[in-house]
Image (cartoon, grey):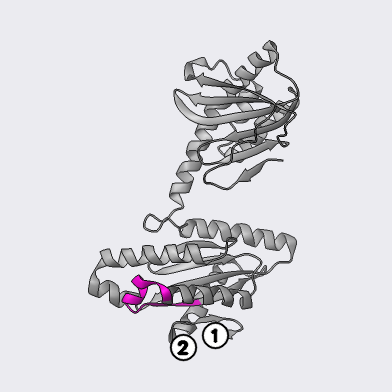
Amino acid sequence: MLTKVAFGKVKQPQPVRSQSQVSQLTSSRDLSRSNTLTEVLQTTLDTHQLLSVYADFLKTRLDVEALQFVSDDQLFSLIGDFDQSQIQHAVMLYADQAYLGQLVYGLKRPLTVTQKLRLEQWHRELTFPLRNALKFSQLHRLAVRDHLTGLGNRALLEEVLEHLHIKQQRQKNGSHSVMLLDLDGFKDVNDEHGHQQGDDILRVFAELLRTTVRDSDQVFRFGGDEFVIVMEDTNLYQAQDVYNRIRTAVDSCDTLSRYGLSTSAGTAQLECFNTVEQSLDEADQCLYQAKHGGKNRHCGSVGCA
């Protein structure tokens, strides 16, 4: 089973009994006529699926106890786990001089000359499909990020909510919530001090949300000064606790306090019988209640506070 580890600085495999490391530079001119592995690898641009296909192919042809692919910002565990008894063989992959990452193998015994030659051929077949998948993944990450705040944008929000909605329909349990927030008084500040100052305030608020919510929560910019927090396994009472932490952080923020800004929020629970759009509309209605009930407060279907 392929496990994808979160983006960020990745932890390298633990040291093992012995180690060999090589670099494999593959040029597009090195590729011969497509064979079975090449053809299968070219059927997907999803990095997760691509590496899974390669790992499945490898397991039937080489005695590998552990395998990872490590790039600058991602780590994929493909086969087993590394331990001190294994021999480690690491191969850095390059496509037309561009570094992609490295495949790290955990082996029971050193590779034979024949096995090394076969592995080199498999790496040549993997290299360019992997390069294309990594480029596609990078473009997708850029496409779903808000350029101003760096948070996920509305397209990514809808993607995440659809996935969560499908998961909820399948499992028939779990309590998930979506919170919609905005800044009370932001329009007046933006009109009086200009859009540049308004953008700075939005960046500050986005960072405040990112650092205040729980590790399991996801934050998105919905548009303008509206933001959304997706909270898995969270009921409306727990969502109130999340909002209280955010409100306290806003009160303590020098930049936001300087302009007399506060935040209001509305939360709806994701229900299997509702669409994603209906859940967002319900959160928007709760936010409307919070704004027109005095601002600087949170409303959900259980009430306002």
Instruction: Using the rendered view, name the quadrant where residue 176 is placed.
Output: bottom right
- State left or right for residue 45 relative to residue 259: right
The quarter in which the N terminus is drawn is top right
- SS label for mark 2: loop
Instruction: Using the rendered view, name the quadrant where residue 107 is placed.
Output: top right
Q: Which residues are magenta?
A: 252-265
In the rendering, at what x and y percent does residue 248 appear? Answer: 48, 76
Numbered tag placed on residue 7 in the rendering: none
Type of amino acid at the residue the image marks with label 2:
Gly
Alpha-carbon neighbours of circle 2 within 10 Å: few (<14), some, or many (≥20)? some
Residues at circles 1 and 2 in contact by the CB criterion of under 8 Å = yes
Type of amino acid at the residue the image marks with label 1:
Cys
Which residue is at 23% across, 75% downward?
192
282 lies above or below 105: below
- SS label for mark 1: strand
113 lies above or below 289: above
Which residue is at 59% across, 74% downward?
239
For the question of whether residue 222 can be seen, the reply is no
* Residue that sits furthest to the bottom in the current view: 293
Numbered tag placed on residue 304 in the rendering: 1
